[in-house]
Image (cartoon, rainbow, N blue to C red):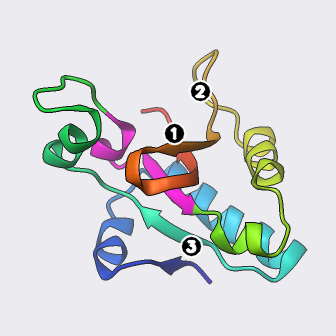
């Protein structure tokens, strides 16, 4: 079962790119099958104001989150259960290659106050 850290995400979920929704449901099934874990989504859509909070006021840098093509996944429970997030990242990238060369569908990284998380993205 997919879990959301706040109710705003439930509303945003239906606005996501169909391929991203497919990946999130697949990942939830993968986690449940292998470790009886549920997917926890921490971030979906991002406003321009939120983008500027991360990258600086007046930034022209755009994010897939602004277009319903990005999702951030919590790794807190995975790490607590000694599940390496890199296993999930590799599985996602193997199952869902990104549509553009030199890009990845899934990344394990840290961004500002959000801390370490798995970022999932899809092309247009």
Q: Where, quadrant-wise, is the C terminus in this rendering?
A: top left
Q: Quadrant of residue 9?
A: bottom left
Question: Residue 31 or 59: which is nearer the viewer?
Answer: 59
Q: Is residue 1 above or below residue 54?
A: below
Please give left or right for residue 10 compared with residue 28 in the image.
left
Residue at image coords 30%, 43%:
67
Instruction: Report x, y in % for residue 57.
Output: 12, 32
Residue at image coords 38%, 56%:
16
Q: Which residues are magenta?
A: 63-73
Question: Residue 4 or 55: which is nearer the viewer?
Answer: 55
Location of mark 1 (residue): 122
Q: Label 2 to label 3, Cα distance in Å?
A: 25 Å
Disc 3, SS = strand
Q: Quadrant of residue 76?
A: bottom right
The magenta stretch spans residue 66:
yes
Q: Earlier in the sequence, mark 2 or mark 3?
A: 3
Instruction: Report x, y in % for residue 3.
Output: 53, 80
Residue at image coords 64%, 16%:
102
Question: Residue 29 or 71: which is nearer the viewer?
Answer: 71
1 and 2 marks in contact (CB < 8 Å): yes
Q: Label 1 to label 3, Cα distance in Å?
A: 18 Å
Instruction: Report x, y in % for residue 113.
Output: 39, 53
The magenta stretch spans residue 9:
no
Determine the residue located farthest toward the right in the rendered image: 34
Location of mark 2 (residue): 99
């Amino acid at each position: 079962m997919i879990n959301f850290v706040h109710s705003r995400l439930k509303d945003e979920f239906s606005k996501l790119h169909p391929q991203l929704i497919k990946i999130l449901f697949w990942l939830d099934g993968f986690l449940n099958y292998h470790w009886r874990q549920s997917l926890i989504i921490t971030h979906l859509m991002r406003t321009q104001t939120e983008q500027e909070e991360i990258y600086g006021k007046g930034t022209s840098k755009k994010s897939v989150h602004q277009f319903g093509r990005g999702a951030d996944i919590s790794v807190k429970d995975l790490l607590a259960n000694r599940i390496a997030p890199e296993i999930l990242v590799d599985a996602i990238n193997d199952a869902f290659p990104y549509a553009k060369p030199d890009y990845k569908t899934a990344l394990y990284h840290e961004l500002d106050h959000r801390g370490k998380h798995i970022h999932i993205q899809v092309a247009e």
